[in-house]
Amino acid sequence: MVMMTVDPASLRIVVYPDSALREKSKPVDPEDETVREVARRMLELMHDADGVGLAAEQVALPWRLFVTHGRDVDPHNRVFINPTLTVNGGELVTEEEGCLSLPGIHVQVRRAPAAEISATDLDGRPFTMKAEGLLSRIWQHEYDHLHGVLIIDKMSPMDRLSTRKALKELRAASSGGGP
């Protein structure tokens, strides 16, 4: 299990092309109070940004952890520590997705219609859930982050063309050069 000294109050959402977004996550200790504090801070950041999910890589931590709030489909704050995800068959469904680490970019992404997830919650209790539709999509999106995969890695050739300028601007802003 990986642990590092972290000040949860200092965490911020990182933006593409930050290298932290390409990190592969490592398991964390669900009993560690720092992990719980980070998860609570991630929930705050997600809500402040009006998002439905946030993975630890998006706050520059290579931890196997993400949080969600599925609004109408799951109106609860949920914490997923060391999750494992299984997608359930059926034909892939294409829907538009955005990402808090890719501001202003929305692309069509193909995903499985349903998934099952097992993880540990904020109180250290293991749980398993199943979902279809939007909630399943949120889990799959956040789970991808734990493997360094972004929606731009899954976009269509058409979306690749339409987002080229926005991605170039994000890269230029990160290098301090402006668009």
Image (cartoon, rainbow, N blue to C red):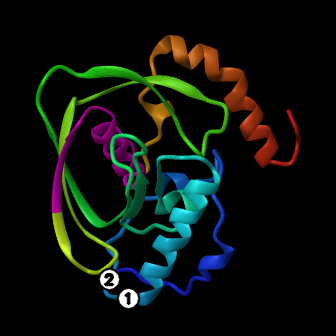
Q: Nearer the viewer, residue 141 or 45?
A: 45
Q: Which residue is mark 2?
A: 29
Q: Which residue is mark 1?
A: 32
Q: Is residue 51 above or below residue 137?
A: below
Image point (23%, 65%), residue name? 119
Question: Hey, what amino acid is under mark 2?
Answer: Asp
Residue 94: quarter of image: top left
Residue 130 horizontal side relative to residue 137, left or right: left
Residue 40 horizontal side relative to residue 80, left or right: right
Q: What is the quadrant of the N terminus in the image?
A: bottom left
Residues tagged 2 and 1 counted as in contact (Cβ below 8 A): yes
Q: Residues within 10 Å of mark 2 (few under 14, many from 20)?
A: some
Name the secondary structure under disc 2.
loop
Q: Residues within 10 Å of mark 1 (few under 14, many from 20)?
A: few
Image point (49%, 72%), residue name? 40
Question: Hey, what amino acid is under mark 1?
Answer: Asp
Q: What is the quadrant of the C terminus in the image?
A: top right
Q: Name the mark on residue 65.
A: none
The answer to if 142 sits in the magenta stretch is: yes
Name the secondary structure under disc 1.
loop
Q: Which residues are magenta?
A: 128-147
Q: Which residue is farthest left? A: 89
Residue 147 horizontal side relative to residue 45, left or right: left
Residue 44: quarter of image: bottom right
The answer to whether residue 60 is visible is no
